[in-house]
Image (cartoon, rainbow, N blue to C red):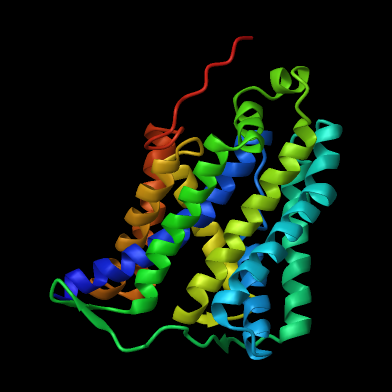
Amino acid sequence: MILLQLIYSGIALGMIYAVIAFGYQLTFATSGTLNFGQGEALMLGALVGLTLVGLGVNYWLMIPIVCVFGFIQGAVVERIAVRPAIKTRSEFGWIMATIALGIIFRNVAENVWGRDDLPFPSPLPVAPIKLAGANVLPMELLVVFGALAMMLLVELFNRKSIHGKAFVATSNDRDAAGLMGINTGLVITFSYALSSLTASFAGVLIAPLTLTGATMGAVLGLKAFAVAIIGGLSSGTGVVVGGLILGIAETTTGFYLSTGYKDVPGLVLLLLVLAFKPAGLFGKTAIKKV
């Protein structure tokens, strides 16, 4: 039963990694760039949510407010850090710019909320419930279903709405989409906004299970990037599978070996994927004509 309980906790952790990694996919699909401040978007979402809850806002009402905040924050990141690099065709400018903005956001958070980690009140009962003989926290179930629901909603938006189809068209061929009259610049801005929205949403999901602070997003963002690479930056299924693998590997390794080794299995898997399947477990190798 201990193993089953570790698997439950690993699934919840892995789904958080997956929803953040899903945000990486959104920006990479439209612009070929990534927001390396994605972890800070999660952190800001959690801290803004904590402030709203402290002001008396109901947790469930707080979630859409935080999502709007994340949407705006992502659009700002694209306008300041990514768009200038795309216009000048700078190959690495967006990398340093998004990292720099992430550091700025972290420093601002430290000055506004302090350096200490803060508890986030849980909206659900803290007493565990029995599931197939093992204990699972209600909040862990919310994390799993909430993360899946967010990714499903984004996929439905892309497939069913006219704006989502513009997103898909830009993802498939940005130049052709531009020639067909699609404002690809606006689509890229939207992809960054949507990416930060998913990260902010992940922040308020995981916050009740852990402490909330200015540094909480750094490790989560990095591990989510590893999940995106392991699963494949072009595969939604890949980030879910990669997140589950990494989450379960961390919880089981931390219990059976040592918490000091819990990061090792994921990093080893990342190195193996980069060596033998650089496009990811579910990714497709791109073929370019030169």
Question: Percent position (x, y) of residue 164?
Answer: 61, 37
Identify the image quadrant of the N terminus: bottom left
Residue 252 vs 160, above or below: the answer is below
**Quadrant in the rendering for residue 278:** top left
Residue 182 shows in this picture: yes
Question: Percent position (x, y) of residue 211?
Answer: 52, 83
In the foreground, 67 or 134: 67
Residue positioned 61% across, 65% down in the render: 200
* Furthest residue in direction top, as rendered: 290
Question: Percent position (x, y) of residue 234?
Answer: 50, 35
Residue 12 vs 149, above or below: the answer is below
In the foreground, 30 or 267: 30
Q: Count the numbered circles shown.
A: 0
Residue 263 shows in this picture: no
Residue positioned 64% across, 9% down in the render: 290
**Quadrant in the rendering for residue 90:** top right
In the foreground, 69 or 1: 69
Question: Percent position (x, y) of residue 181?
Answer: 78, 22
